[in-house]
Image (cartoon, rainbow, N blue to C red):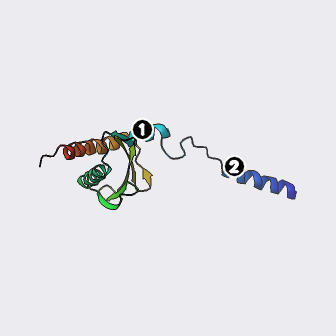
Amino acid sequence: MKKVIVALCGVTLLCGCVSTHDDVLGTSYSQVETRNYQSRMFDTSDRQMVLRSVISTMQDLGFIIDRADETLGTVSGTSFTYSSKLTVSVRPVGKTQMLVRANAQAGLDEIASPVAYQNFFNALSQSLFLDAHTVE
């Protein structure tokens, strides 16, 4: 009788750990698709200019900058209007390009809409263009 109870407890514990959901993280996109719409390459080697543009773009979009680390190339901000957080990382790829990757979340949920990231990158592209072509 004890063996049956122990066996049932073991099976119950093992079944409790199995996920029946195909999308464990709550998104229907694969990691490659997600990384694709969260990332953009920019043709510049000036990392500081890209970081400054990221900060100004985030502020233009209503984010309050919580943390900016030039050494790591990351900027994090919070938007109280939309109850969301945005973290952006900038890293060089080769000698002439910068990879910018954004990760946004609303509350505890990841923002998985490609449109939100497209809007951010469109604004960032405009900011980088204006910064690169300023006339003094």
The residue depicted at 22 percent of the width and 42 percent of the height is 129
**Lateral position of residue 113 relative to residue 19, left or right:** left
The residue depicted at 49 percent of the width and 40 percent of the height is 31
Q: Which residue is denoted by mark 1 in the rendering? A: 36
The front one of 22 and 50 is 50
**Lateral position of residue 59 relative to residue 136, left or right:** right
Q: Quadrant of residue 63?
A: bottom left
Q: Which residue is denoted by mark 2 in the rendering? A: 15
* Amino acid at dot 1: Asn
The residue depicted at 42 percent of the width and 38 percent of the height is 36
Which of pointers 1 and 2 lies earlier in the amino acid sequence?
2
Name the spot of residue 114 as percent of width and height, x first: 37, 40
**Lateral position of residue 24 relative to residue 9, left or right:** left
Q: Secondary structure at mark 2?
A: helix
The front one of 67 and 29 is 67
The residue depicted at 25 percent of the width and 53 percent of the height is 56
Does the image show residue 63? yes
Q: Secondary structure at mark 1?
A: helix
Q: Quadrant of residue 93?
A: top left
The front one of 46 and 76 is 46
Q: Residue furthest front?
A: 95
* Amino acid at dot 2: Cys
Name the spot of residue 88 as percent of width and height, x first: 37, 51
Picture quarter with the N terminus: bottom right
Q: Residue furthest bottom?
A: 66
Name the spot of residue 6 as percent of width and height, x first: 81, 57
Q: Label 1, label 2: how many angstroms apart (C-alpha)?
A: 35 Å
Q: Residue furthest right?
A: 1
Name the spot of residue 121 as percent of width and height, x first: 30, 43
Q: Quadrant of residue 43?
A: top left
Q: Nearer the viewer, mark 1 or mark 2?
A: 1
